[in-house]
Every structure is written in structure tokens, then in C-alpha cells.
Amino acid sequence: MEFIFTPEVIMIALGVFIMRIINMALDTVRMLVNVRGKKTLSWILGFLQSIVYILALAPVLTDLNNFLIVFGYAAGFGTGNVLGMYFEERLAIGHLNITVISSTRGTAIVDELRKNEFAVTETPGRGKDGTVSIISTSVYRKNLGKVEKIILDIDQNAFITAENVQPIHRGFWR
């Protein structure tokens, strides 16, 4: 591998790096919306990703022996993965089922969630130390922070889990 650091090579490597970031960010978001069943959005992102991929790969294949261009390609790959995860988190596409186990404040959590117009199901249960409330609510991912805050403001010791779900039939979605 050659180590050529002319202004032209540096600009090409930087361009490859930026295009690869865009390519991988699109790929990561596309994969995550694909899992959530968003066909149209997945197609659009896949189309754009393919174009950017070809544009990013062409300079690398033209000069495979230039370390700086190959480095830009690889660095863009890693950076784009992380950036794509960040974007997908911010988009918050999809639905979650949140399960809460509270040993002392279940009724208060249920009342507050309902007051904030979230659909809630409460089931009595038995834990290691006695009776507990098992609370289930399905929400849009964008509401996770709000729901978590409501729960923790009432019961700091609540056990909370969240699972991605795909709605099938009916139900109440705030």
C-alpha cells in the first residue's frame, strides 16, 4: 500500500469518508425500519443507499493501493453505523410494549398513565418478596421517555422492560 498525501488524494479520501458515512447511516436506518415493516420508507432508503454506495466505492476500486482512500472508506463504514443508530433513535419509528413490575406503587402508576391517556393493563402477580403489580402498556416509541418518567417519578424501584412490537389488530394508541 502506498502512502500518498497530495491535496487531491486527501480530498478524494475525505469525499469517500463522507459518502460512506451517509451510505452506512442510510443502511442502518433502512434495516431498522425494514424490521418494523415500513416497506415504502425501506425502499426509498435502499434506493438512496445504493446510489451513495456506488459513488463511495468507485474511487476505492480505482486506487486500491492508496492507503488513505481505503482508510477513508473503512472509517466511514464504522462512523456511519453509529450515526445511523443515532438517527434511528431520534426518529423513534415503531411501537413498544412496556412492562412494569412494582411491588408497592402499581395502582398509582396505572392511574397516572391513564391520566396521561395511555392504555394500561394491570395484572396481580407474585414476586420473590410477595405480591406485585404487573403493568403493561403499548406505546409509540417516541413516547418511551414520557412513560418512563411517569413510572420513575412514582416508583424509583420499579422494574421496567420494553420490547419492540408490531400491532396486528385494534387497540388504543395514544
Image (spheres, rainbow, N blue to C red):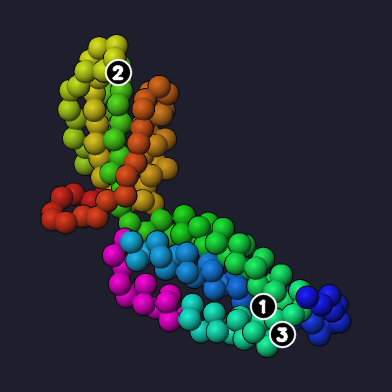
Q: Quadrant of the rendered structure where residue 46 is?
A: bottom left
Earlier residue among tags 3 and 1: 1
Q: Badge 3: few (under 14), some or many (20 or more) residues near its Cα, within 10 Å?
A: some
Q: Nearer the viewer, mark 2 or mark 1?
A: 1
Q: Residues within 10 Å of mark 2 (few under 14, many from 20)?
A: many
Q: Which residue is mark 1?
A: 16
Q: What residue is rendered at 33% in x and 61% in y? A: 35
Q: Is residue 133 magenta?
A: no
Q: Secondary structure at mark 2?
A: loop
Q: Nearer the viewer, residue 28 or 96?
A: 28
Q: Earlier in the sequence, mark 3 or mark 2?
A: 3
Q: Say which residue appears at 81% left-offset and 77% top-offset.
A: 2
- The location of residue 116, given as percent across then percent down, is 29, 40
Callout 1, which amino acid?
Answer: Val
Residue 63, disc: 3
- First in sequence, mark 2 or 1: give its number: 1
Q: Tell me which segment is drawn in magenta.
A: 36-48
* Residue 30 horizontal side relative to residue 129, left or right: right
- The answer for how far apart the CA atoms under marks 3 and 2 are is 64 Å
Q: Are marks 3 and 2 in contact (CB under 8 Å)?
A: no
Query: Which of the two residues, 146 or 161, is positioned nearer the viewer here?
Result: 161
Camera sees residue 28: yes
Q: Nearer the viewer, residue 130 or 137?
A: 130
Is residue 41 rendered to the left or right of residue 61?
left
Callout 3: SS: loop
The Cα atoms of the two marked residues, 3 and 1, are separated by 12 Å
| Image: 39 above or below 36 | below
Residue 171: x percent and y percent?
A: 15, 50
Q: Which residue, given by chain and number where applicable, does mark 2 sit on?
A: 103
In the rendered view, tell whether residue 75 sits above or below residue 96: below
